[in-house]
Amino acid sequence: MLRFSISVFLLFMLLGCSSRNSEQDGSFVIDGKKVVVPLEVDGEPVPPDPGSDGDDTLLGIDHNVNGVRDDVERYIYARFQGFEHANKERAIAMQYGRAVQHILEFGAEKAMTSQQMMSKASECEEYYYEQYHLNEDSKSQDILDAEYKDIVFNTRERLEIYFDYNAALSGKVFTVKIFPSLSTCEVDITKIEN
């Protein structure tokens, strides 16, 4: 009963503070600063702002059909502007985005598959940190942090699916690779230029 009460409390807390982070002009507030989403990155157009229509359905809008909701993809492009390895970090964030979409689409039904996708994204991130010698002092933040989660689980329905997914994994044991490898990355981040 206590776990349920805590979950309900967190649900209301998150819904209270994680309403759409996007402002009227399609920008985001990231780390307390307004960041405008570029129209294109590396010659590729960034998807249009879905506005509130993006929250009308569980899976949202994926205009360019790349497996990541448009509002999340726009956040990713905004968040990593000006980073030394921005395109590598965007690739990892997009991998997380596809894993999150899997969670939203299948919830508890395919929780183990979603968890494997999340693990691969996490291991890819660790591989990236090791390859570019980023430690806690030199990296700006984890890619999948609370702010990112606030963006992807930004409606009550999405948050409830996430809680169901977590509940389905409760009591299971997972292994963590000591030496993450490039094979866990969907994209070869070593070949991405910045």
Image (cartoon, grey):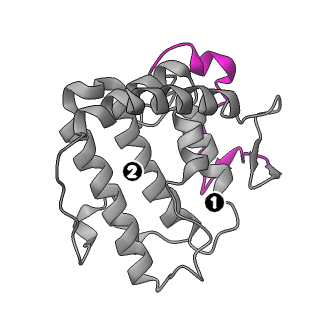
Q: Which mark is residue 80?
A: 1
The quarter holding residue 154 reads top right
**Span of residues in magenta:** 35-58
Is residue 95 magenta-colored? no
Residue with the mark numbered 2: 95
Q: Nearer the viewer, residue 39 or 156?
A: 156
Quadrant of residue 15 in the image? top right
Most distant residue in the bottom direction: 133
Where disc 2 sits, the SS reads: helix
Residue 182 in picture, x, y percent from top left: 27, 70
Residue at screen point 80% across, 33% down: 23
Q: Amino acid at mark 1?
A: Phe
**Location of residue 38 with respect to 123 vertically, above or below:** above
Residue 155 position in % (x across, y down): 56, 23
Q: Which mark is residue 46?
A: none
Residue in view at x 60 percent, y 52 percent: 43
Q: Categorize mark 2 by other alpha carbons within 10 Å: few (<14), some (14-19), many (20+).
A: many
**Please, which residue is most extreme toward the top here?**
56
Amino acid identity at mark 2: Gln
- Horizontal side, residue 134 vs residue 21: left or right: left
The number of callouts visible is 2
Residue 170 shows in the view: yes
Residue under the point 82% across and 32% down:
25
* Image quarter in which the N terminus is found: top left
Q: Nearer the viewer, residue 181 or 141?
A: 141
> Which quadrant: the C terminus?
bottom right
In the image, taking residue 157 as reference, residue 95 lies left or right, namely left
Among the two numbered marks 1 and 2 on one chain, the one whose residue lies closer to the N terminus: 1
> SS class of the residue under badge 1?
loop
